[in-house]
Image: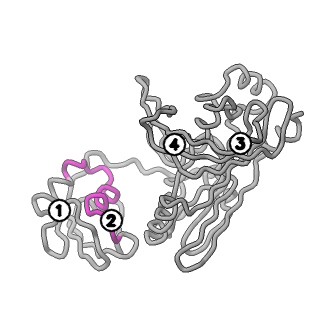
Amino acid sequence: MGSPSRGEALRTRVVIIDANFASQRVDNYLFSHLKGVPKSRIYRAIRQGEVRVNQQKVAPRYSLQVGDRVRIPPLRVAEMPVQVKLSSSWKTMLEQSVIYEDGDILAFNKPVGVSVHGGSGIRLGLIEAVRLWRTHERFLELVHRLDRETSGCLVVAKNRPVLTELHRLLVSHQVEKQYLALVLGDWPISLQEVSLPLQKNVLKSGERKVEVNEKGRPAVTRFRPLKRFKEMTLLEVRPVTGRMHQIRVHAASMGYPIVGDEKYGDTYFNQRLRQRWQRRLFLHAAGLQWTLSNGKKIGICTVLDEDWRKVLREAV
């Protein structure tokens, strides 16, 4: 138990919290499980004692514990969510993209162009599709994110304890992340690490963009040339931190933008690229590695797609 099913927002229900939802704030728990109910209504229900935990009023910040009995009152939804069906193409893509699975995680080789979650005009992202595909799984949450334009390794947690542990490992830089990037120019072998603070900005158009700024958050990326072409260099990239667009901005700030990057890259070169090869960002999450507290080591590697292989075959 621990998660109310769809359509139960209109009748009183008592939910017993299990390990998948322990340590989560009660307000966040209700937000995620009462889709369509305005946040203001949920807060009012908590504040007025309509929502109770173990028959007691609690604050929105109350941290749920295993065995807690949460009373959820009938709350009217603002608009019933539209039931989305998983298309056969989505199902096929997911089936073909799974590269690792055990009792705790599900890992995908995410194709380029697939958003990891819905929103901002995107009706269905990968995590929503996975939940529709794996309906027998009671808990599925993204461990980390990849840009829509980036292909490669994406991990989904199948229970909250492992999600919490992997988040802890990520924050403490104990997850080794390896990327492959194709950049414009002859990357110097002496340039092995870029340490520049990054700051997120939202433009008037609503577009999010990251820039190097001394007031930003610390960011460190390590680079190693693997192969040189006439106009490009193939790099192994190991980000130490995990800032938004970190690899793309660090590479571009050094004068070697990632090939196909329409946000931070070279417009003229990208136009030439599209005439010969696929229009896309050549940044790939090649693998992840970590060690759990129980000593279990996990290493996940992904293969390059045909767009990548074609460029590496034909580039001179």
In which quadrant is the C terminus drawn? top right
- Work out whether residue 225 or residue 13 is closer to the camera in this orientation and state it: 225
User: How far apart in space, not on screen, are marks 1 and 3 (Cα)?
Assistant: 47 Å
- Please rate how many residues cluster around mark 3, counting C-alpha atoms within 10 Å: few if below 14, some from 14 to 19, many from 20: many
Residue 24's mark? Answer: 2
- Please rate how many residues cluster around mark 1, counting C-alpha atoms within 10 Å: few if below 14, some from 14 to 19, many from 20: some
Instruction: Indicate the amino acid at tag 2.
Output: Gln
User: How far apart in space, not on screen, are marks 4 and 1 (Cα)?
Assistant: 32 Å
The quadrant where residue 43 appears:
bottom left
Q: Which segment is the magenta one? A: 22-41
Q: Where does residue 163 sit, x and y in percent of width and height?
A: 47, 66
Mark closer to the observer (4, 1): 4
Residue with the mark numbered 1: 59
Mark closer to the observer (1, 3): 3
Instruction: Indicate the amino acid at tag 4.
Output: Met
Q: Earlier in the sequence, mark 1 or mark 3?
A: 1
Residue with the mark numbered 3: 181
Which residue appears at 61% of the width and 41% of the height?
A: 194
Q: Would residue 48 be seen by someone viewing this image from the given angle?
A: yes
- Please rate how many residues cluster around mark 2, counting C-alpha atoms within 10 Å: few if below 14, some from 14 to 19, many from 20: some
Q: Where does residue 127 sit, x and y in percent of width and height?
A: 51, 54
User: How far apart in space, not on screen, are marks 1 and 2 (Cα)?
Assistant: 13 Å
